[in-house]
Image (tube, grey):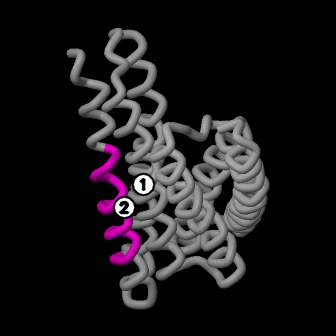
């Protein structure tokens, strides 16, 4: 039972590439079979929501079962990054409009830059603590990706125009909010590293 949180985290790691593969399949079917593409995007949304729930659930279970470990924490962070990187890259390649591709590049670029900064600091025995802006950014990007997957599904399945428009607007606002928070939080992290507060 104590291994359950780690098992959930590992499942989330594998869900990232699986959802990305489904997105590429849906994009390939968009013009050949719209309803099938819409159903695949709906499946992507369901799996993405499930993966997001496991992100909360594995941490809660680890605390509840007194099974918090350094390995579990490291895997949890890795699972979050694998999920969002796989899904955002697949969407940027297959479905995102140019404006949202720019937002995705900002989000992913920030994550890569901070991973390098964390690695560099670890060699000198320092670490970058997670700040609240980073958590807000993660929440905005997850909600934005979910909204965009919902938009794709709704549009391809001929949902009412109000639903399609609302999901499109929500996705755009949330992903650009995530991009803005990515930039601001990156500045905060770099300043902390520069001033020795990390």
* Front tag of 1 and 2: 1
Over which residues does the magenta segment extend? Answer: 12-25
Q: Residue at x 70, y 67 (%)?
A: 168
Mark toward the start of the polypeptide (1 vs 2): 2
Q: Nearer the viewer, residue 34 or 15?
A: 15
Crowd band around label 2 with a 10 angstrom C-alpha radius: few (<14), some (14–19), many (20+): many
Q: Quadrant of residue 17?
A: bottom left
**What residue is shown with label 1?**
83
* Residue hosting label 2: 19
- Where's residue 194, x and y in %? 72, 50
Q: Magenta includes 193?
A: no
Q: Secondary structure at mark 2?
A: helix
- Residue placed most toward the observer, 159 or 70: 70
Image-quadrant location for residue 77: top left
Is residue 75 shown left or right of residue 134? left
Q: Is residue 154 visible from the viewing direction of this image?
A: yes
22 inside magenta stretch: yes
Residue at screen point 64% across, 57% down:
144
Relative horizontal placement of residue 9, taking residue 148 as reference (left or right): left
Using the rendered image of the protein, determine whether residue 166 is visible from the camera's viewpoint: no
Instruction: Tell me whether the residue at label 1 lies in contact with that at label 2, contact meaning CB atoms closer than 8 angstroms.
Output: yes
The crowding category of the residue bearing disc 1, from other C-alpha atoms within 10 Å (few below 14, some 14 to 19, many at least 20), is many
Query: Residue 42: percent from the left, percent from the top?
Result: 45, 59
Provide the secondary structure element on which disc 1 rests: helix
């Amino acid at each position: 039972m104590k291994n359950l949180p780690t098992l959930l985290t590992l499942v989330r790691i594998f869900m990232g590439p699986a959802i990305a593969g489904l997105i590429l399949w849906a994009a390939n079917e968009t013009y050949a079979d719209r309803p099938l593409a819409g159903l695949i995007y709906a499946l992507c949304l369901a799996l993405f929501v499930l993966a997001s729930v496991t992100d909360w659930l594995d941490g809660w279970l680890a605390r509840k079962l007194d099974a918090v470990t350094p390995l579990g924490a490291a895997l949890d962070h890795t699972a979050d990054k694998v999920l969002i990187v796989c899904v955002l890259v697949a969407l940027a390649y297959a479905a995102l409009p140019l404006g949202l591709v720019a937002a995705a590049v900002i989000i992913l670029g920030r994550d890569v830059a901070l991973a390098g900064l964390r690695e560099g600091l670890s060699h000198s025995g320092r670490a970058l603590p997670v700040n609240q802006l980073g958590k807000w950014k993660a929440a905005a990007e997850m909600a934005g990706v979910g909204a965009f997957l919902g938009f794709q599904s709704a549009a391809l399945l001929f949902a009412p125009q109000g639903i399609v428009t609302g999901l499109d607007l929500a996705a755009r606002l949330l992903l650009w909010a995530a991009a803005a928070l990515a930039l601001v939080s990156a500045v905060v992290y770099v300043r902390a590293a520069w001033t020795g507060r990390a």
